[in-house]
Amino acid sequence: MSVPARRQPLLPDLSDWFESFPSLMGWRPMASLQAIRVEDFVDGDDYVVRAELPGIDPDNDVEITVRGGVLTIRAERKEEKSEKNRSEFRYGSFVRSVRLPEGAKEDSVNAAYKDGILTVRVPLSQPSTEAKKITISHDE
């Protein structure tokens, strides 16, 4: 099955911009400004979205929804480290949405998490190549 290639956006992801932006006097973007980094591709009869979510508990801190042809991944990080005389924490909410390709079966989405990578697979149906004839009604 052949699915048209996805068009690249005119502007790169903001996360790419922030990562390439040199730090100014030690300034770094806050965790709440970071986006979920994703890659998407077609693998056989599936549309696949892989998202980087290291340090996230997928059972408690990740929500995946599909609505109106859009797949949305939401995650929240709550991480604390305590050592002798020192503690550190990171937290933030992240969200990323992607438009599903034509023929995506929204009711058959599945997801798996391994080694900090969330993989979402959406089965695709073969799009109809036949033109559908539309009849014209006459209003009187």
Image: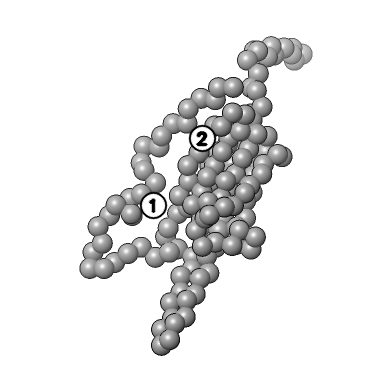
How many numbered discs sit on the rendered protein?
A: 2
Instruction: Give the image quarter of residue 132.
Output: top right
Residue, disc 1 = 15
Q: Position of residue 82 (x, y in %)?
A: 47, 80
Residue sitting at x 39%, y 65%: 30
User: Tag on residue 41?
Assistant: 2
Instruction: Give the image quarter of residue 66.
Output: top right
Q: Secondary structure at mark 1?
A: helix
Residue sitting at x 50%, y 39%: 40
Q: How is the image coloured?
A: one colour
Q: Disc 2 to disc 1, how far (Cα)? A: 20 Å
Residue sitting at x 65%, y 60%: 59
Q: Is residue 45 above or below residue 108?
A: above
Quarter of the picture holding the N terminus: top right
N-terminal label among 2 and 1: 1
Q: Position of residue 127 (x, y in %)?
A: 64, 22
Q: Sort mark 2 into few (<14), some (14-19) or many (20+) by Cα contacts within 10 Å.
A: some
Is residue 12 something that shows in the picture?
yes
Of circles 2 and 1, the one toward us is 2
Tags 2 and 1 in contact by the CB under 8 Å rule? Answer: no
Q: Amino acid at mark 1?
A: Ser
- State the residue lying farthest toward the left: 25
Q: Position of residue 3 (x, y in %)?
A: 54, 25
Q: Sort mark 1 into few (<14), some (14-19) or many (20+) by Cα contacts within 10 Å.
A: some
Is residue 96 something that shows in the picture?
no
Q: Secondary structure at mark 2?
A: strand
Residue sitting at x 64%, y 12%: 131
Q: Position of residue 83 (x, y in %)?
A: 44, 82
